[in-house]
Amino acid sequence: MGGHHVEVPAAKQWEMPKSWMTTAIALMVVGLAGTVYGFVDASWRGWSNVLIAGVYFTGICLGAAFQFAVYSFVNGGWWISVKRIMEAFTTFLPVPMVVMVLIGLFGMHDLYEWSIPEIMEHDTLLQKKKLLLNETGWMIRVLVYFGIWMTTTFLMRKFSRAQDVDPDPKYTLFNVRVGAIHTVLFALTVTFAALDWLSSLEPHWFSTIFGVYQFIGMFVCAASTLILFILSMQRAGYLSWINEDHYHDLGKMMFAFGTFWAYIWVSQYLLIWYSNIPEETGYYIVRNNHGWLAIFFLNLACNWVIPFLVLLPRNNKRNPKVIGGVAGLLIFGHWLDLYLQVMPATSHFAAHHHGVDVHGPIFGLQEFGPILLLGGLFILTMGKMLGRAPLLARNDPYLQEALNHHQ
């Protein structure tokens, strides 16, 4: 902890701005209409977009939880100024849990070919994977994953908020331990959840770094969402202690981890390309034909090329408007990344096993309905949960380091 002592600023009591409420309701109304329309149009299309939305918001919650955990056990300082927002993100986990449970109860046969007994009976490879690829096991693991995530995030929030009443640093030490445990469990559960929810959409395909790929997408999307919330809260007159130095660190996170995403993306692609094993190449053959190639490269541009070039200059990382724009692009980019993972697989499945005439990408209100619906719920949840604890953790032992933060 360096620097001189800074007087702790007064933190306004949080009240959800009317603009948040208006935006949330508008998103939910449009999103609900799009979701219903998706199911009326075609059940496989409705469930595909619900799956994307469920995985997307699980990722935002877990990306925030991972940052909370890691910054705790590495004794990070600057993040104390925004940790209450990260805490609020994690409270949304029950909503995507309900989404995934609904998929397990009603949507499996529209998404996963291994859930159809006739296909399983005539596929030798799928029969060998039956121990994992079965509906009961899938559902049990959903409950186990979310049970672990909600337990560890609850404990981290509990100890953090207990310190508001009692300044004893023991609560910080408690979170060091819980954060370390959460990180280990996170690595395991996210990997298996990625295989269950996304990779098994194409059960003959496999990638040894698929879990890492999903993790880094979650991290970048959570960091980008955090930036947009900070900007919105500052416009509403809150978070006066956040300055350009904090934005610089947030910008560096997007820049660095976006590049890490690109590294994993290229690594997966090149390993499969030069190995040229049919079970692996099929994944990319589908996504390089029938109109998917443009989306394939747009995904790379949104998630790395454009953010990398824009955030390369130092001043851009310190400019709230610039990193806000990049954050918005990355939030869209993560949705596009999940769309490219899910929709080619489920549309191919629908075409071959349900007789649906679908070839190439499809975009409509149906695709954006579930993501907008959960987005509105997310904003409402944040508007409520941010008022459950002071916006500034005044008794945190690293508070002075956060307020003294400079580049």
Image (spheres, rainbow, N blue to C red):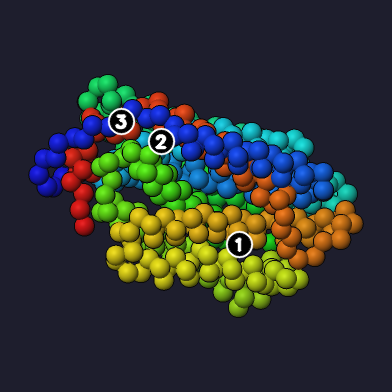
Percent x, y of residue 297? 59, 71
Q: Secondary structure at mark 2?
A: helix
Q: Secondary structure at mark 3?
A: loop
Q: Nearer the viewer, mark 1 or mark 2?
A: 2
* Neighbour tally class for label 3: few under 14, some 14-19, many 20 plus, Cα within 10 Å: few
Q: Nearer the viewer, mark 3 or mark 2?
A: 3
Q: Label 3 is placed on what type of residue? A: Lys
- Looking at the image, the residue that sits furthest to the left is 4
Percent x, y of residue 245? 25, 54
Q: Nearer the viewer, residue 262 or 375?
A: 375
Res. 40 visible in picture = yes
Which label's residue is closer to the chain start, 3 or 2?
Answer: 3
- Disc on res. 12: 3
* Neighbour tally class for label 2: few under 14, some 14-19, many 20 plus, Cα within 10 Å: many
Q: Mark 2 = which residue?
A: 87
- Looking at the image, the residue that sits furthest to the bottom is 274
Q: Label 1 is placed on what type of residue? A: Ser
